[in-house]
Amino acid sequence: MKTSVRKSRKNSKTQLTQFLGFLVLRLSVYLVLFVLIYFLYDVLSHGSKVISWEFLSQAPRKGMTEGGIFPAIFGTFLVTLITAAVSVPLGMAAAIYLNEYARAGRLTRLIRLSIRNLAGVPSVVYGLFGVILFVNLMKLGTSLLSAGLTLALLTLPWTITASEEALKTVPDSYREGALALGATKWQMIRTNVLPYSIPGMLTGAILGLARAAGETAPIMFTGVAFYLPFLPASLKDQFMALPYHLYVMATQHHSLDRAKSLAYGTALVLIVFVILFNLTAVIIRSRLRRKWKN
């Protein structure tokens, strides 16, 4: 009798603990969703009043209190393109080497630890490093190329980590089967590993690029300009970008009241830009998974 009473109390205590645990988790999710929805509603309600074809297709006028943000949109697209061209191939190649070729040991563990630590370094540090390396030492000047290379360094740890984790999801039996049939190491990787890991690798790379597209500090020191009446004609020109344009309009403008509505419009365009990146990652992943599954 006593034993059954103890079990009943223990079960009741376990159920209460489980209920409280799930309640805390639910409240945390609801709190995060509430903040996110409120933030998006605030930006959408104010920014949608500014969005127009003129706002998206023209350059700023009259001290950036009229006109549009097309140079900033174009500059953000170009610098993200440079970032992708550098960080994605290098990051995937580094991940393939670390996961498939590198021997397990202290040096490999140290390299992986360093990569994960670099992923947590503040972006302003990358900006200062970009000034020293690309602007001063490599004599690239404050330019589109310097900013793109700096953002590539910022994105590289994310790309390497995501790509390596995607490679680890491929079962070892796929590798062993290819090697048993006489395939070389690279043939095994190319035919039996990459097809199944590419969706995850590309998803991580695109999400890293979406983060880079919204960074302000790295490009602030390496190439972005407050205002330019023209589009960059070469990689050595300065450029405008949405994150820095938003920062200036929201904090540094000489007439914050007149620029506030334009800042909301810029924020909305930047959010849509990042959402499109994330949506692209989802579409690419689903299509590649469907292709290789078939």
Image (cartoon, grey):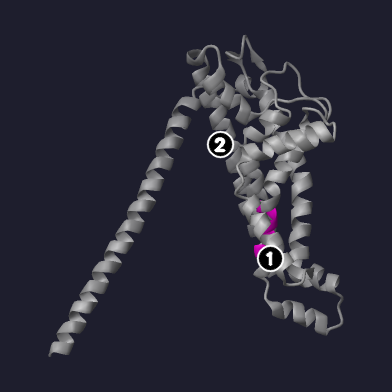
The kind of secondary structure the magenta stretch mainly shows is helix
In the displayed structure, 114 sits above or below 100; it is: above
Displayed quadrant of residue 195:
bottom right
Magenta residues, start to end: 158-165
In the displayed structure, 220 sits above or below 20; it is: above
Amino acid on which disc 1 is placed: Arg
Magenta stretch contains residue 163: yes
Mark 2 and mark 1: Cα distance apart in space: 37 Å
**SS for tag 2?**
helix
Crowd tier of the residue under label 1, counting other residues whose Cα lies within 10 Å: few below 14, some 14–19, many 20 or above: few
The answer to whether mark 2 and mark 1 are in CB contact below 8 A is: no
Crowd tier of the residue under label 2, counting other residues whose Cα lies within 10 Å: few below 14, some 14–19, many 20 or above: some
Magenta stretch contains residue 150: no
Residue that carries the numbered disc 1 in the rendered image: 109
- Residue 211's x, y, as percent? 61, 43
Query: Residue at the spot x=79%, y=32% of the render?
Result: 135
- Residue 157's x, y, as percent? 68, 52
Query: Residue at the spot x=51%, y=26% of the render?
Result: 264
Quadrant of the image for the N terminus? bottom left
Quadrant of the image for the C terminus? bottom right
Residue that carries the numbered disc 2 in the rendered image: 271
Query: Residue at the spot x=59%, y=13% of the render?
Result: 66
| Residue furthest left in the image | 1
Amino acid on which disc 2 is placed: Ile
Displayed quadrant of residue 81:
top right
